Amino acid sequence: MNNNLIARASITINAPAEKVWSASVNPEAIKQFMFGRNVATDWRVGNPITWKGKWQGKSFEDKERCDAFTSPISNGNIYIAIMLG
């Protein structure tokens, strides 16, 4: 079995980069588009990202790692890479 699978997704959002950035890193904003999930992280590369919430009445906790992170200040683009696990 190949365990080195990579999934990539890209979207264009018609909004100022600073507004998209704020929504991407603000836990209360994230909750609105991530089905009520709570996120705990400092968004530093290599550090954990923990998602907690409920799905169909059952509590869950997912753990990931922040692999890359750039703010829109550098070039107007936002890049966040998350490694599952």
Image (cartoon, rainbow, N blue to C red):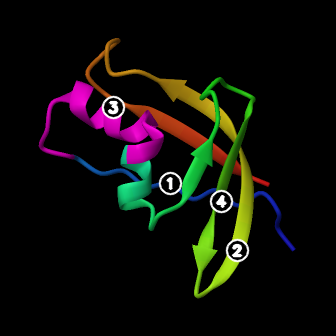
Instruction: Tell me the quarter of the image containing the N terminus.
Output: bottom right
Give the residue displayed 82% in from the left and 67% down from the top.
2
| Circle 3 residue | 22
Task: Count neighbours of disc 2 (C-alpha within 10 A) and say few if under 14, some if 14 to 19, many if 20 or more.
Answer: few
| Circle 4 residue | 52
Q: Earlier in the sequence, mark 4 or mark 2?
A: 4
Looking at the rendered structure, the kind of residue marked 2 is Ser
Quarter holding residue 75 = top left
Q: Earlier in the sequence, mark 1 or mark 2?
A: 1
Q: Earlier in the sequence, mark 2 or mark 3?
A: 3
Task: Count neighbours of disc 1 (C-alpha within 10 A) and say few if under 14, some if 14 to 19, many if 20 or more.
Answer: few
| Circle 1 residue | 8
Query: In 3D space, how far apart are the residues under numbered discs 4 and 3 (Cα atoms)?
Result: 20 Å
Given residues 53 and 15, the one toward you in this image is 53
- Magenta residues span 13-28
Please, what secondary structure does the residue beneath circle 1 have? Answer: loop
Please, what secondary structure does the residue beneath circle 4 have? Answer: strand
* 14 within the magenta span: yes
Furthest residue toward top: 74
Looking at the rendered structure, the kind of residue marked 3 is Ser
Q: Earlier in the sequence, mark 4 or mark 1?
A: 1
Looking at the rendered structure, the kind of residue marked 1 is Arg
Contact between marks 1 and 2 (CB within 8 A): the answer is no
* 21 within the magenta span: yes
Please, what secondary structure does the residue beneath circle 2 have? Answer: strand
Query: In 3D space, how far apart are the residues under numbered discs 1 and 2 (Cα atoms)?
Result: 27 Å
| Circle 2 residue | 59
Given residues 37 and 45, the one toward you in this image is 37
Please, what secondary structure does the residue beneath circle 3 have? Answer: helix
Query: In 3D space, how far apart are the residues under numbered discs 1 and 3 (Cα atoms)?
Result: 22 Å
Task: Count neighbours of disc 3 (C-alpha within 10 A) and say few if under 14, some if 14 to 19, many if 20 or more.
Answer: few
